[in-house]
Image: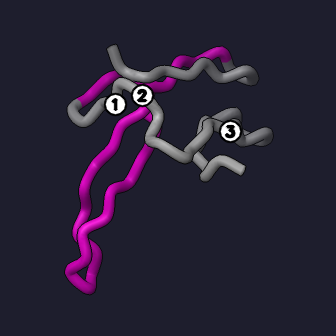
Amino acid sequence: MAYSVQSKKTGETYYLHSKDVTLRGGRLQTIYFFARQEKEGAMDDLPAGYEVMENSRTGLPMLRKAK
């Protein structure tokens, strides 16, 4: 089961995903994003050292490094 968060503003459920992308310089980097549907790349848990926050204007969840 993928890690999910429910928006406090809209009530929508979002699922955490990760994807490895290649940057212009050739460096490989992992990106994290939330989607409304479970797709390929869905994660079961939060990555270490990150926490979920919600954008107060749009209600969309985002990851940030834990303080």
Q: Which residue is mark 2?
A: 45
Q: Please tell me whether mark 1 sits on a helix, a strand or a loop.
A: loop
Q: Please tell me whether mark 2 sits on a helix, a strand or a loop.
A: loop
At label 2, counting other C-alpha atoms closer than 10 Å, the crowd grade (few under 14, some 14-19, many 20 or more) is few
Residue depicted at 72% across the width and 50% down the height: 67
At label 1, counting other C-alpha atoms closer than 10 Å, the crowd grade (few under 14, some 14-19, many 20 or more) is some
Above or below, comparing residue 19 to residue 17 in the picture: below
- Does residue 55 appear left or right of residue 21 in this picture? right
45 magenta-colored = no
Q: Looking at the picture, which amino acid does disc 3 mark?
A: Met
Residue depicted at 49% across the width and 25% down the height: 14
Write the start and end of the magenta stretch as one range.
11-39
Residue depicted at 44% across the width and 41% down the height: 47
- The image's mark for residue 53 is 3
Q: Which residue is mark 1?
A: 43
| Dominant secondary structure (helix, strand or loop) of the stretch shown in magenta | strand
Q: Quadrant of the N terminus?
A: top left
State yes or no: discs 3 and 1 in contact (Cβ < 8 Å): no
Cα distance, mark 1 to mark 2?
Answer: 6 Å
- Does residue 18 appear left or right of residue 22 in this picture? right
Above or below, comparing residue 55 to residue 4 in the picture: below
Q: Looking at the picture, which amino acid does disc 2 mark?
A: Asp
Q: Looking at the picture, which amino acid does disc 1 mark?
A: Met
